Amino acid sequence: MAVSLTGTRVSIVALPWFVLVTTGSATRMGLVAFCEMAPYVVAKVLTGPLVDRTGPRAVSWTADLVSAGAAAAIPLLHASDLLSFPLLLLLVALIGSARGPGDLAKEVMVPEAAGRGRVPLERAAGLSGVVERLAFTVGPAVGGSLVVLLGPVTVLMVNAGCFALGSAVVALSLPRGMGNAAGGADPQAGAAERGYWQRFGEGFTFLRGDLLLLTVGVMLAVTNFLDAAFITVLLPVWAEESGNGPAAIGVIGSVQGAAAVGGSLVAAVAADRLPRRVVFFTGFLLAGAPRFLVLAFDAPLGAALAVFALGGFGAGFINPVLGAVFYERVPRPLLGRVKALSTSLAWAGIPLGGLAAGAAVASAGLVPVLLAGGAAYFLTTTSTGLRPEWRDMDHKDGRGAAGGHPTADRGGGTSRESAPRPRS
């Protein structure tokens, strides 16, 4: 997970900058982001039943190998002067299509790894969350620094190498027999004989019937749309227009990520003793709108870093709350399918974020788009909390009145594994 996620984070810096310096178009940069994330969301939402049937180990290493080949093809074709823009979009879409099931497969293997290692599931899930945060801290620093030193084309080859290494780790180093298809893991009658769409529908029916999880997913779809716009278009355009360059992107991402790691560690110790709703919405208040505003008002880089650090610390408290709520409310036999669906719902806005931001910046300019994005983020993360189902977040047995499932078998436990993570 660390290797693959670091490669992904390096790519988030290198690929948009590659498009910007080779085409000079914010609109094309947004289109590239759309062509990566739209297939990611679609593939991930559809592959929950397939990962269960095929086995997460095979899906993981195969998907990473496909991502490595597509990522390596971009700089190689560019060096040969054969990389047209439509071909670039096709390769980026292939990377996104492979990353979706690959990421899901790794998440599915965490509980099995915990069992084999005789590590409590809560600790293993917390470790995977910290690894994710660290990768998203190291990646921007590595990506921004390497882009400055070597150029975006070379850094794209580094990204391909990370995917290839991640594939080899899963394929060759895991214990024999780990990550195979879960043949009897679903205790419901006739599980092995049920078709793909029937199994898919079971997860969909559960998610649709849980108002809290459904509302969380819709809210995250909006905030992730705004986060994607910010990361893939607004921040790089600001870095270029302000003269700070790609190194500023890496420094900002690293400072925010390091603060998020600190917030996550504090949350792991104390969040279970704090009121969930207060922690959740305070985290969003710190992590959302202030980022947009500090760039819109052209604050010095030091002030911007302080705002991003505070936002990262607040963001670190969000996923422990979401993870606890998610695993309390979803029965173990449905975890893979419901996780795929809920993640895809939360990420549904991401493919459109960069596309919309690129068009908006081209027509209105950077500052008005930053102000509008900050206002939309603030309204989304405050007004949503007025809905009644949010009271269920504080019911730690997962049986709130507004959409819980008191008859479901919850499979024992409140694992802290991350639910859909805002891309803040």
Image (cartoon, rainbow, N blue to C red):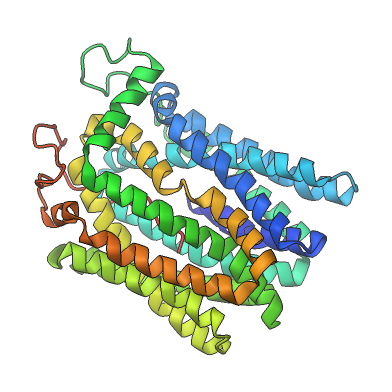
Query: Which residue is pictured at 50% across the width and 31% down the height?
Result: 59
Query: Which residue is pictured at 42% across the width and 34% down the height?
Result: 175
Q: Answer yes or no: is residue 304 visible.
A: yes
Q: Position of residue 256 (x, y in %)?
A: 46, 73
Q: So how many labels did they put on this image? A: 0
Q: Is residue 6 left or right of residue 241?
A: left
Name the quadrant containing residue 272.
Answer: bottom left
Q: Position of residue 172 (x, y in %)?
A: 53, 35
191 or 134: which is nearer to us? 191
Q: Is residue 144 left or right of residue 154?
A: left
Name the quadrant containing residue 279.
Answer: bottom left
Residue furthest right in the image: 81
107 or 202: which is nearer to us? 202
Q: Is residue 296 left or right of residue 348?
A: right
Q: Is residue 147 above or below residue 400?
A: below
Q: Is residue 138 above or below residue 368?
A: above
Q: Position of residue 401 (x, y in %)?
A: 9, 46
Name the quadrant containing residue 260.
Answer: bottom left
Q: Position of residue 142 (x, y in %)?
A: 61, 67
Query: Which residue is pictured at 27% across the width and 19% down the height?
Result: 184
Q: Answer yes or no: is residue 167 visible.
A: no
Query: Which residue is pictured at 79% across the width and 50% down the height?
Result: 75
351 or 116: which is nearer to us? 351
Q: Quadrant of the C terminus?
A: bottom left
